[in-house]
Image (cartoon, rainbow, N blue to C red):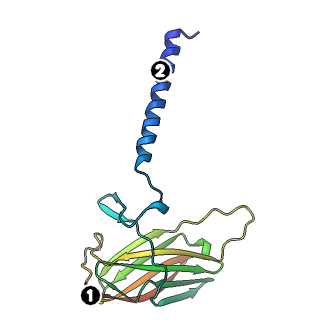
Amino acid sequence: MLSWAKIVGFILIILAVSILGAYSYMYSNSSYRSYSEATATDSQTLKGYVETIVEPPSKFYGPTFTEEALGLKVIATLSNSSVRVGETLWINVKFVGEKACSIILARITVTNSRGQKVHDVYVWLPHRTLAPGAERPQEESYMFTWKTSKDPSANVEVTPDDYTFLIKVKVDENEVTVKGTVKVVGQ
């Protein structure tokens, strides 16, 4: 049998945890804004990197590069054919075909005319959950960016030059690579 002291102690512990939880919830949500509410001036800091949330351009005026193999067509369209040092190049990548929904990882590499890597990242590609028996989508689109400034991992300055980008994805045990070029001009 429980004594009144134990019951009161138990109730006080539950009350204290509830109050702390409510305070924590109110404090954490006071500065929270969803992605749709974010503006170009909002920033998040993680492990020494600062990520600024910006919206992609509404139209892409740059060239389109395409590669097709193994039931997958990869189409990469650039936001512009040239970009200034310090600005962001947007790359709209579309996967079309029966394997479009099976791509889970992409590698984006950018090299200068001397063959030095100035940007090299792997990107995990999220997919929506399909209902049982639903058809797999035949088309998936993703937006990638390259900020034309010194990347901490590459440690090479971005200067006015012609740059080559590669987007590599694995299909079954084979690799499909889209290759394109972009001109970086001075500020």
**Which of 72 and 33 lies nearest the eye of the viewer?**
33
Query: Residue 172, can we see it?
Result: no
Q: In the rendered view, does 178 fall on the left or right side of 172?
A: left
Check disc 1: other Cα within 10 Å, few if <14, some if 14-19, many if 20+: some
Check disc 2: other Cα within 10 Å, few if <14, some if 14-19, many if 20+: few
Mark drawn on residue 120: none
Element assignment for label 1? loop
Element assignment for label 2? helix
Horizontal and vertical percent position of residue 1: 59, 9
- The C terminus sits in image quarter: bottom left
Q: From this view, report whether residue 34 is shown above or below residue 26.
A: below
Q: In the rendered view, does 158 fall on the left or right side of 121?
A: left
| Residue to which mark 1 is pinned | 160
Residue drawn 61% across and 72% down?
Answer: 101
| Residue to which mark 2 is pinned | 12
Residue drawn 47% across and 23% down?
Answer: 13
Q: Which badge, 1 or 2, comes first in the chain's sequence?
A: 2
Horizontal and vertical percent position of residue 89: 39, 80
Residue drawn 53% across and 84% down?
Answer: 75
Which amino acid lies under the numbered mark 1 shown in the image of this protein?
Pro
Query: Residue 43, can we see it?
Result: yes
The reply to whether discs 1 and 2 touch (Cβ–Cβ < 8 Å) is no
Which amino acid lies under the numbered mark 2 shown in the image of this protein?
Leu
Horizontal and vertical percent position of residue 80: 41, 86
Image quadrant in which you'd find residue 173: bottom right
Residue drawn 40% across and 42% down?
Answer: 27
